[in-house]
Amino acid sequence: MSGLLALLDDVAAIAKIAATSLDDVMGQAVKAGAKASGALIDDAAVTPKYIHGFEPARELPIVWQITKGSLRNKLVVLLPAAMLLSSFAPWAIMPLLMLGGAYLCFEGAEKIAHLFQPRHGPDAKVAAATPDNPVHLEKEKVAGAIKTDFILSAEIMTITLAAIPESTLWMEALTLAAAGIGITIMVYGGVALIVKADDLGLLMAERGRFSLTRATGRAIVRSMPGFLKVLTAVGTAAMLWVGGSIVIHGLETLGFTWLGHHIHDLAVLAGEAAPYAHGAVEWIAKAAMDGVLGLGLGLLLIPFAKAIFTPLWRAVTGGKPASASH
């Protein structure tokens, strides 16, 4: 009996350790995933364009196919690569993180630059065409979305890896996997809600039993175009803020602290000017300065990307544009 009780005590102790470890994994995953908010919002803002133009019955299956591709990108390709990097080349994490931050700056700056470019034709919007082979078009769109997701997922996983506290290899792997799965569910769950919101609004407007239900449905339909524009704007701002802050933090880690210290000091001064909202004003000031620096860096990178990176990417991918914003 004493042996059985001792065994039960051991099992209980192991279960307690496992539960604590699971709590640590989930807590670290949430904190680390929050650092990737810029790329996450961009992912949610970009994906709906790949579903546009298809029959409503095909929208959710297409989102599900892209979701599975995103999970493969994160768990099958990027997670092992991140673990190898963490084990054998941890020194490379910060330069790669800065590269990802610079790419976020480039993406955000490119979207803003497109607003000031002349548009050809009477209408800049391209009407959805009815393809001769919708099955082929669907496969092509899904493949394009998964390729775009790979770029954004690489940014997300690198940012998340850098945000995970130093720990054992299996803890880092579990945390990264949990963050990747959680981010994927959040992004593509949101995308599913976005692409079906207008259908829900139409259903409510046409079949609602109460006037309030019908009015709410009409409001949803009318608000969706504006909502998508706001989502795109928020995604662009988040990319510039997160990208700029990553680059600044990376420079500080590498010993170039001047810029980061000046931004911090200016943010503190801004916070002291508003004593009743000190913390909020300081955070907003720092985020704004990080974003402005990100925009400046992104604008500097646009000519370089067009001259070198874009032709190289098109040669590799068979003519597909490199930017997720296109």
Image (tube, helix red, strand yellow):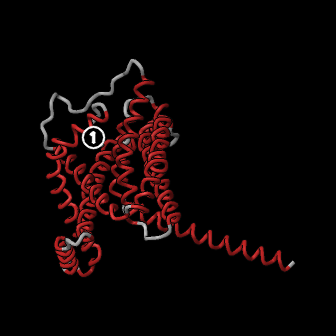
Residue reaching furthest to the right: 1
Q: Residue at x 72, y 71 (%)?
A: 11
**Label 1 sits on residue:** 322
Q: Position of residue 98 (x, y in %)?
A: 27, 60
Q: Quadrant of residue 242?
A: bottom left
Q: Residue furthest top?
A: 132
Q: How far across and down, in percent of the image, does residue 321 sit?
A: 27, 36
| Viewer-proximal residue among 133 and 75 | 75
Question: Can you tell which quarter of the image residue 313 is in?
Answer: top left
Q: Position of residue 88 (x, y in %)?
A: 41, 61
Front residue of 92 and 150:
92
Badge 1: how crowded within 10 Å, few (<14), some, or many (20+)?
A: some
Spot occupied by residue 266 in the image (x, y as percentages of width and height): 17, 75
User: Relative to residue 287, is residue 191 drawn left or right?
Assistant: right
In the rendered view, would you say 164 is above or below 157? below
**Residue type marked 1:** Ala
Position of residue 311 in the picture relative to residue 17 (left or right) = left
Residue at the limit of the structure toward the front, as seen here: 88
Q: Is residue 216 visible?
A: no
User: What residue lies at 37% left-to-right and 42% top-to-bottom?
Assistant: 47
Residues 63 and 254: in front is 254
- Determine whether the residue tagged by mark 1 lies in a helix, strand or loop: loop
User: How many numbered dots are placed on residues in this image?
Assistant: 1
Give the residue drawn at x 24%, y 81%.
275
The quadrant of the image that shows the N terminus is: bottom right
Q: Residue at x 45, y 58 (%)?
A: 83
The quarter of the rendered structure image containing the C terminus is: top left
Q: Is residue 121 visible?
A: yes
